[in-house]
Amino acid sequence: MLNGEKKIARPLRWGMIGGGRLSQVGYKHRTGALRDHTAFQLLAGAFDIDAERGKDFGVNICMDESRCYPDYKTMFAAEAKREDGIEVVSIATPNGTHYEITKGALEAGLHVICEKPLFFTSEEGEEIKALAEQKGKIVGVTYGFSGNQMLLQMRAMIEQGKIGEIRVVELQYTHGFNANDQADKTSDAQKWRVDPKVAGPSFVLGDLSTHTYYMSQLIMPHMKIKKLLCDRQSFVGSRAPLEDNAFVMMHYENGAVGRLWTSSINAGCMDGHRIRIVGSKGSLEWWDNKGGELKFEVQGEPSQTFIRAMPYLDESCNADERLGALHVEGLSDAWANIYLKFAIAIDAKNRNDEETLKNLVYPDINAGIDGIRWIENCVRSADNGAVWVEIENKNPQLV
Ligand code: NAI
């Protein structure tokens, strides 16, 4: 169980890019990173594309005004001159900026924590991975939901064979907030999401399904997709070629099959984030809106609901517990778990502690690149008429 005591020698000096007053995701980063104030200290920021608003925001969250910068390049240059300059930066800006800012940050000698989808192409991902290796830096990806410890319970139970051989994987991340085009016209955060120049080659596949795809890989690391077929639609026509709905069928290397539904036009849906894994003996099911519960159903036996923080859970799951039984945990706790692991990874990297890095389960650069490849394969399949695409490492072959 976590209680905020330090896991690394001292808190890391941290800066943020984006994530300011009008940002959707910025506060999630801060609640995650600053939950364990023994892990990160927020010291600098270029919080907004609007320099004045960014500075005003920084002052309003009680930062030193002189370290609220008009843009990230100024921040990197000024902080590099300080003895107490930042050593890690989080990037919470729209997708199309991630690659350039990550590259700049690594070149400035900083560790990076970046939003998903990481970049537009897997080539960019590989280039940044090589640069990070050369600089001896970590690049983490904020798949925030994946910090929910019940996913580690699923991982442990699957590894222990509790549900047998996996046969069916059912993934869903859907909502209905874009059932019409109102937000496309009125919300800055939605406008860029349907502009391929800023969002990249997809809308909901990148915006939503990269989370759920990563979570499925987290709980079933041995399950590799052999081929997939993606069918994507733009029910609001002005969003084309970007999709607001997609179905993906998957065949795994071990013979299992899967399907994923991602959508922002699932009108009325308020609880559409779900993972169900069906094995030869039983099934596991987790819903994000009841994230402290895990359904375990064995064929022929009464179904069970495992509850967070109970001693019968796996050690790996309870190691990430924060509040204890009878209390509700949620998304902020999941983000705090992810950020704590980023801190541990960065500290280990700084000390060349490869053993810690090898055993730490967290969304690293490889998870980010895997997410880009997921999108690339889905888009390639869909845009060739919803055909099966063989997943051959870097270069998927149409079949
Ligand atoms: P948003 O549109 O709400 O906010 C973006 C913010 O970035 C704005 O405040 C803007 O002023 C700022 N910005 C843009 N360019 C900048 C620059 N060059 N320098 C400094 N600030 C800049 O977008 P939202 O929804 O917060 O998404 C941002 C990123 O986070 C996206 O990549 C998105 O996919 C991801 N995201 C991740 C979530 C998660 O659960 N991990 C949840 C929501 C978004």
Image: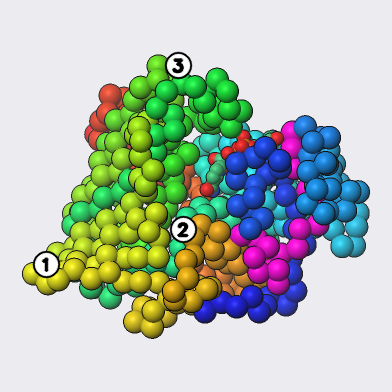
Q: In terms of secondary structure, where does tag 3 sit? A: helix
Question: Of all residues shown, which one is farthest toward the front?
Answer: 326
Residue at the spot 31% in from the left edge and 48% down from the top edge: 171
Question: Disc 1 designates what residue?
Answer: 299
The foreground one among 395 and 22 is: 22
Give the crowd class for mark 3: few <14, some 14-19, many >=20 residues within 10 Å.
Answer: few
The foreground one among 164 and 311 is: 311
Inter-mark Cα distance, 1 to 2 = 28 Å
Question: Disc 3 designates what residue?
Answer: 238
Corner quadrant of residue 333:
bottom right
Is residue 34 within the magenta segment? yes
Q: Amino acid at mark 2?
A: Ser
Is residue 327 within the magenta segment? no
- In the rendered image, the vertical position of residue 317 relative to residue 51, given as above or below: below
Image coords of residue 110 (percent x, y): 74, 55
Residue at the spot 71% in from the left edge and 64% down from the top edge: 40
> Residue 338, can we see it?
no
Question: Of all residues shown, which one is farthest toward the top?
Answer: 238
Region of the chain picked out in magenta, as a range:
32-49
Residue at the spot 28% in from the left edge and 24% down from the top edge: 385
Q: Amino acid at mark 1?
A: Gln
- Give yes or no for contact between labels 1 and 2 (Cβ–Cβ under 8 Å): no
Which badge, 3 or 2, comes first in the chain's sequence? 2
Q: Is residue 196 left or right of residue 38?
A: left
Which badge, 1 or 2, comes first in the chain's sequence? 2
Q: Quadrant of ligand 1?
A: top right
- In the rendered image, the vertical position of residue 153 relative to residue 233, given as above or below: below
Question: Disc 2 designates what residue?
Answer: 146
Mark 2 residue's CB less than 8 Å from ligand 1: no
- Give yes or no for contact between labels 3 and 2 (Cβ–Cβ under 8 Å): no
Image coords of residue 84 (percent x, y): 87, 62
Give the crowd class for mark 1: few <14, some 14-19, many >=20 residues within 10 Å.
Answer: few
